[in-house]
Image: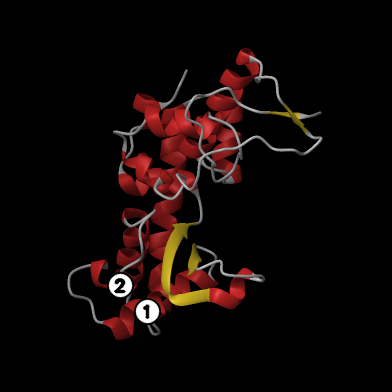
Amino acid sequence: GRMSVCSCPTPIVGIMIPNCCVICKVVRGISSAPSARWWGSARMAACFPWSSPWVSSSPMDSALHDKLLKNLLLYLFIGGLPEVVNTYKEENDLKKCMKVLDDHLHTIRDDFAKYKKKLPALILVETLDAIARQTGNKFKYSEIGENEPYHLTKPALNFLQMAGLAHLVYHTSASGLPLGSSMNRKKFKVLIYDTGVYQRIMGTDLKKYIIQ
């Protein structure tokens, strides 16, 4: 089907759903929640009408819009880990989902001890937590733990990236194509591997913010 242009008066180009005020409503609706920082880089530009034949000029059906919003919020809060998704699907219980996420995070942190000959487990834990706290902002090694040395924090971030637990988003001036030609590797943001894990690190109470 054709994509509808949202009729929101202040739409935003979002990270996942372009040209739709779903992102806008999420930002406004949970702006006081810790998860709001997740959308720090979402306010990139104002939406504009597309000339693509796949875009309709009519507003999206309100019932469909509300359903998309609810599903987006649900995904942002519980994430996409198979065990968590299956728990919600079978139990429809956010408290149980939070327990599964907490157990998963505990396992990840315990596994860091296996690599203590390469890096201290505490440095890896502090780096993972720092990624969540700095989401949406330029990443600073100095904000990992308390005065942790650079010769440990940089390898720790590299380790998490190679393990698939962190994703680096580099700055580019976008002065030409390909974008990588103007990429600045000294300036970057870091995203954690799962939105549900992010919520648990930040201590978000899912039942308080989710739309029922």
Q: CA distance from mark 1 to mark 2?
A: 7 Å
Q: Quadrant of residue 126?
A: bottom left
Amino acid under disc 2: Tyr
Residue 204 at x, y percent in the picture: 33, 38
Secondary structure, mark 2, is helix
Q: Is residue 105 above or below residue 109?
A: above
Secondary structure under tag 1 reads helix
- Left or right: 205, with 64 as reference point: left
Q: Quadrant of residue 88?
A: top right
Name the residue at 61% across, 39% down.
Answer: 17
Crowding at dot 1, Cα within 10 Å, few <14 / some 14-19 / many 20+, comes out as few
Q: Are marks 1 and 2 in contact (CB under 8 Å)?
A: yes
Q: Find residue 133 and report its horizontal and vertical position in percent.
A: 31, 54
Give the mark nearer the N terminus: 1 vs 2. 2
Which residue matches tag 2?
Answer: 141
Tag count? 2
Which residue occupies the foreground of this view, 52 or 3? 52
Q: Which residue is mark 1?
A: 154
Relative placement, left or right, of 42 versus 55 is: left
Asked if residue 17 lies left or right of residue 42, the reply is right
Identify which residue is drawn at 79% across, 34% down. 54
Quarter containing the N terminus: top right
**Residue type, numbered disc 1:** Lys
Residue at 36%, 70% (x, y): give it. Answer: 124
Q: In the current view of this chain or complex, which residue is farthest to the left?
A: 146
- Residue beneath the point at 45% across and 21% down: 211
Residue 102 visible in image: no
Using a 10 Å C-alpha cutoff, classify the residue at mark 2 as few (fewer than 14 neighbours), some (14 to 19) or many (20 or more): some
Q: Position of residue 47 (x, y in %)?
A: 56, 38
Identify the disc placed on residue 189.
none
